[in-house]
Image (tube, grey):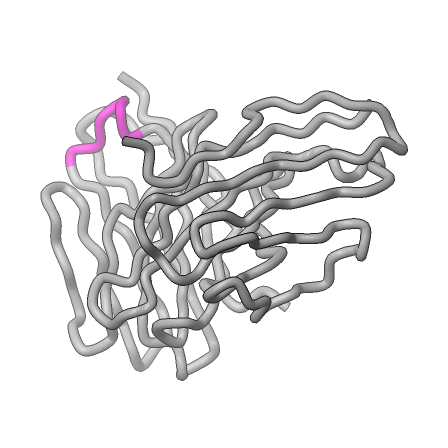
Amino acid sequence: QQQVKQSPQSLIVQKGGISIINCAYENTAFDYFPWYQQFPGKGPALLIAIRPDVSEKKEGRFTISFNKSAKQFSLHIMDSQPGDSATYFCAASKGPGNQFYFGTGTSLTVIP
Amino acid sequence: DTAVSQTPKYLVTQMGNDKSIKCEQNLGHDTMYWYKQDSKKFLKIMFSYNNKELIINETVPNRFSPKSPDKAHLNLHINSLELGDSAVYFCASRTSGRGTDTQYFGPGTRLTVL
């Protein structure tokens, strides 16, 4: 079964707007939650990650919000740009040496 | 320098053939993976190797066989290719320590089976 559920499947946002992608998980043993960004024809690359001891992590225009009690986390892209158009994957793992469980991906299109 | 490299980038072949995809990482990582990404972009883990030892083998047909000659290489051999094997295959490597736990993906190999 899908360990990490991701929504929406696709998202269209105007330039300058906020893009929000949501993920949910069930396994409370997960302790690492990364987001990966994938451009067409490329492999996924780490964008930002969070551990459950904090509720928010911000890196530039990208923010992860983490709600441990609800077992949900989300990626917020502020001031979205056309160059942000890509597929975004959330993931979760139980720690070093354990596999990543990826969400199903969100295709983001930012319209100029 | 490319951290994780794969060859070939594109592979077009006929049903029933046998083919291999090579992967090399120069990051000194202990763990390497193979993923399959289908047309819907879903990333499915296939195999995981740690220090040349298989640690994860998801439900994958035994036509797929990974081979790790050393820590830096994890190759994927596929026998008797089928139409459903058409996908993009990604190799990845990962640090094993605490801290930034990052998987580094290769550029992918697009396999097309005709």
Q: Residue furthest right?
A: B16
Res B71 quadrant in image: bottom left
Q: Quadrant of the C terminus of chain A?
A: top left
Q: Is A30 within the magenta?
A: no
Residue B94 versus residue B43: which sits nearer the camera?
A: B94
Instruction: Give the vertical position of B107 relative to B13 (above or below).
Output: below
Residue B1 placed where, x, y %? Answer: 27, 31
Residue B47 placed where, x, y %? Answer: 60, 58
* Residue A87 visible in the displayed image: yes
Q: Quadrant of the N terminus of chain A?
A: bottom right
The residue lying at 23 percent from left, 64 percent from top is: A50
Residue B13 versus residue B25: which sits nearer the camera?
A: B25
Instruction: Give the vertical position of B23 relative to B49 (above or below).
Output: above
Q: Residue furthest front?
A: B69
Residue A79 placed where, x, y %? Answer: 16, 34
The residue lying at 65 percent from left, 53 percent from top is: B66
Tell how many labels: 0
The residue lying at 66 percent from left, 35 percent from top is: B87
The residue lying at 61 percent from left, 38 percent from top is: B40
Instruction: Give the vertical position of A18 relative to B35 (above or below).
Output: above
* Residue A11 visible in the displayed image: no
What span is in magenta? A79-84
Residue A83 placed where, x, y %? Answer: 26, 24
Q: Is residue A77 left or right of residue B108?
A: left
Q: Is residue B93 left or right of residue A110?
A: right
